[in-house]
Amino acid sequence: MKIVFLVRRFYPAIGGVEKHTLAVGEELIKLNHQVTVVTLKHKPNLENEKIYRGIKIVRLPDQQNKFFLWKNLWQQRRIIKTADIVHCHDVFWWYMPFLLVYPFKPVFSTFHGWEGAWPVPLKFRLARKIWESLSWGNICVGDYLTKWYGTKADYVTYGGLYNFTFDRKKNYLNGKVKRGIFIGRLSEDNGIKEYLKAFKVLKKQGWKFIFIGDGPYAKSAAKLGLVTGFVSNLRPYLIQPSAIFAASYLTIWEALGYGRQVYTLYQNPLKKEYLEQFPAAPSIHISGSVQELLTQLNQPRPVCCQFPSWLEVAKIYLKLWQEKTAPSI
């Protein structure tokens, strides 16, 4: 099949949606499908077109104005016209003008997360319902979206892991390591203010911290440890004995894959369900306060979850497309 992904940012940009679309695209290529990613040119030095790991990348000018974006996308309409499947990753509005031009083109959505605003604004919930109703089918990254956005998910996924060999049994935290690594955006929606309160206490006890990420609280974090910015490869950090503080599915999967103890905070009911419904929840430490987090540092847990592969995630996409389009493709 000829598959087109529409996504705001893509490799070499770093983030959960970027990693998800790249990994699924790679697996689809291995299964002999053709994958084209249409995305924005988030850095001026990037090529307009490129082949990366078998995926064709087409970059549009990074325009904030939706009409300029539609104009630029229209100039690439042949990509959509010749596609068997168009799949939108949180940007279904990009495709809306094409609904009239290609009314029988199979178009799908993946809803990757929430916008960080709590309570969830009505405009965001309405937009999701509109996109859901206009899509042939959808995939939700996390079951919490069905409650807080009212989405009727065809499939739910929590992402996956690349295959690698690592002896997790030898790398549990033994309670003596006083090294913490926070991974994620340094912003309020990730609970960074609460993490920083906990880290101030731990720093007085001799802990050292690394912050892998960036955001509004980067300067505050730098007072407690090293701020690296976002990195494309977490392995050099995860192979070192440390406690991992993270709040996103893909980061948690990867940290658990290296046998690390993972600690995460929630700040509202949505984030609480986001974490508690995660398949690996029994293997991580979930807390709703600084004091609870500090207490859990002395209560290590075994990593006892099953790790999904990106091939399994890609097969969810194929199953959805086949169910909703058979026998047309």
Image (cartoon, rainbow, N blue to C red):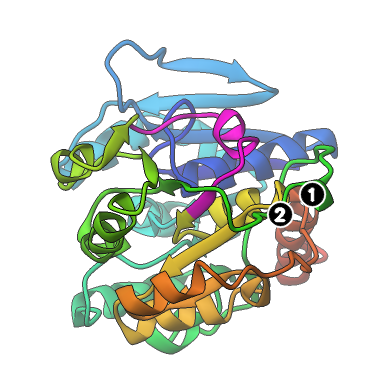
The disc labelled 2 sits on which kind of residue? Tyr
Residue behind mark 2: 172
- The image shows residue 273 at horizontal and vertical percentages of 47, 83
Residue at horizontal 19%, vertical 79%? Answer: 121
Residue behind mark 1: 168
Residue at horizontal 31%, vertical 28%? Answer: 42
Secondary structure under tag 1 reads helix
- The image shows residue 97 at horizontal and vertical percentages of 33, 53
Please rate how many residues cluster around mark 1, counting C-alpha atoms within 10 Å: few if below 14, some from 14 to 19, many from 20: few
- The image shows residue 113 at horizontal and vertical percentages of 42, 65
Contact between labelled residues 1 and 2, with CB atoms less than 8 Å apart: yes
**Whether residue 316 is situated above or below residue 1 in the rendered picture:** below
Residue at horizontal 52%, vertical 25%? Answer: 57
- The image shows residue 2 at horizontal and vertical percentages of 69, 39
Residue 169 visible in the snapshot:
yes
Residue at horizontal 26%, vertical 36%? Answer: 71
Q: Which residues are magenta?
A: 229-244
**Whether residue 228 is situated above or below residue 102 in the rendered picture:** above
